[in-house]
Amino acid sequence: MDDEGQLAALEARLRAESGGGFAHRRLVSDAEPAELAELLGEPGHPLWARELAAFRLGLAGDGRAFEPLVLLLNHRDAPRCASAAYALARLGDPRTGRAAAALATNELRVGYALHPVRLLVALRAPEAVPALVTVLERRLAADRDPHREIALACVEGLGALGDPRARDVLGRARDSGRQELAAAARAALRALQAEGGEEAADAAGAGAGGPAEGAGRT
């Protein structure tokens, strides 16, 4: 779904919450960035208005949306987290990876870590692999972990990132006895193996090319 579709979905979700009045319609389409940023800086506005203003500023690449979007990324309502993650990805603020990693690894709010985890993967942020490894290790250490969806997102994300630092924790996930998680870990390890094979082939090709070029010059 593109930006227009995401905004339309957000508008539809917030219409019922806001009552669909003039203020809602103005924030959806007419309000300028300065007005949106002013709203975010003032106390007393309802959550739906703050979410809509932050989302629109995020899509516009306006850094004033960063802090409100980070707060929404860790909200108890999953749809708010999802819209915040989308806007943060579009915002492109260099602080996003660090903020998402802090939220993902906060064990006190692990139930809300799903969208920070997915955002780290989407951004391919430098903080992504260490954060996902930490979260997955904690999930594997729990005897009866209620956050299986988060563990699965970590495994799938580590497979997509293709970083060999994840191999050990993915091996433990594969051997965890948790059927869905183990299957995802096997797929992630195959992806890592394929990634490693491609890198080895590239290195071999570069090594073979060097002497041949040298021989051509003599």
Image: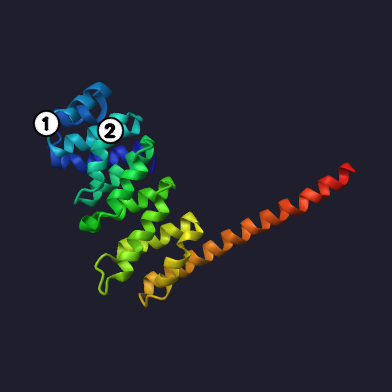
Residue located at (87% from left, 42% from top): 217
Quadrant of the rendered image containing residue 16:
top left
Q: Residue furthest right?
A: 218
Residue pointed to by mark 2: 65
Image location of residue 216, percent across then percent down: 87, 45
Question: Relative to the observer, which residue lies in front, 167 or 28?
Answer: 167
Q: Few, some or many C-alpha atoms within 10 Å of disc 2 (few <14, some 14-19, many ≥20)? A: many
Mark 1 falls on what kind of element?
loop
Would residue 96 appear left or right of 215 to someone viewing this image?
A: left
Q: Residue furthest bottom?
A: 177
**In terms of sequence position, does the residue under pointer 2 or pointer 1 come before the other?**
1
Colour mapping used in the image? rainbow
Would residue 217 appear left or right of 21 to someone viewing this image?
A: right
Residue located at (56% from left, 64% from top): 193
Q: Please state the total of marks drawn on the protein image.
A: 2
Q: Is residue 177 above or below residue 104?
A: below
